[in-house]
Image (cartoon, rainbow, N blue to C red):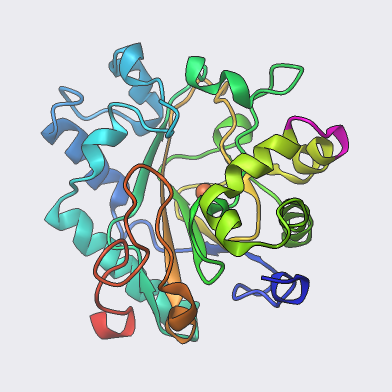
Amino acid sequence: MDRTELDRPSLVETGFRRLTYPHQEFLFVAEVTRMLVEKGIVKNAVSLEELHKHIPPKDQVVNAHYMNNVVDQFYETSTRFRELYFGLIKYIHREYFQYDFIFQAIPNFRFHFPVHFGEAFRNKRNKDGVFLGQHSDTMLGHSFEEVNFWLPLTECRASNALHMSDLASGIQVIGRVFDDIGWDSDVYHTAGREHFHKRLFSDDDFQSLVVRSTKPVDMKVGEFIAFDPRCLHGPAENTEGRTRVSLDFRIIPLHRYEHAKHYRSQGKSKRKFVRGDVFFQVSASELE
Ligand SMILES: [Fe+2]
């Protein structure tokens, strides 16, 4: 990686797109509500925004990997969910993206309950006690060839929305992390987040750049966003009193796959970001 490469044009226009899909046709909310009952997480169907009222507090708290006991039960989805998701991928390909792409085989579920982040996050708060969850997935092992997608299944705003930066600020922050590690891509992709945190919690100007540039993206059901992986993003502590449920997934344009296929997760899974592992074997156009 060098400065020119980091500055290259985005695969997503200006780095960020707010898009829509027909949510009366793609009934994700109904299916996730049904799955919560089927998995025994709630007894009867309840509104997703109200989910926290029906789940023991201990199951709502996230661990250091942002997982909680509800998310843990959503690695297994359902045939119906998979049909909806593949349908959405086809829709995205048809309506919005000129190029063919591979896509994450199963999206990540987030159940972001209105509870405080606990002990696991005490090192991720600034002097005022504010939790700072900003990151780029590239600091966690992902390549720069991916496009991130984020799709809410509840209305979200302020502290339960995703917080995001513009592309220019993201590039500035990532460039600073690269400066710290002598532009070594291996160090960046294996330990980028640690280096980012080191600077974030020791350099007030850097921290203020990160905090100032990441703002909540208020969204409704039926909307989703696509963004460049260089845009910083992350959750805040949810103080809205309402649960936020969302899906996130990544795609890789086929014309960038050769550059993308050497990467693997730095999380506990160590899975590879390749076809047939994290990404589905078949491309979006081959689903048709
Ligand atoms: Fe992320």
What residue sits 61% from the left and 72% below the top? Answer: 12
Residue 47 percent coordinates (x, y): 33, 30
What residue sits 67% from the left and 43% below the top? Answer: 196
- Quadrant of image for the N terminus: bottom right
> Is residue 118 visible from the viewing direction of this image?
no
What residue sits 40% from the left and 73% below the top? Answer: 261
Residue 117 percent coordinates (x, y): 51, 20
The answer to whether residue 282 is above or below residue 255 is above
Residue range of the region highlighted in magenta in the rendering = 201-205
**138 and 16: which is toward the camera:** 138
The reply, left or right, for residue 261 in relation to residue 116 is left
Most common secondary structure along the magenta stretch = loop
The reply, left or right, for residue 276 in relation to residue 161 is left
**24 and 173: which is toward the camera:** 173
> Is residue 97 visible from the viewing direction of this image?
yes
The answer to whether residue 124 is above or below residue 271 is above
Residue 274 percent coordinates (x, y): 34, 69
What residue sits 70% from the left and 62% below the top? Answer: 183
**229 and 265: which is toward the camera:** 265
The answer to whether residue 270 is above or below residue 154 is below
Q: How many labels does the image show?
A: 0
Residue 14 percent coordinates (x, y): 70, 70
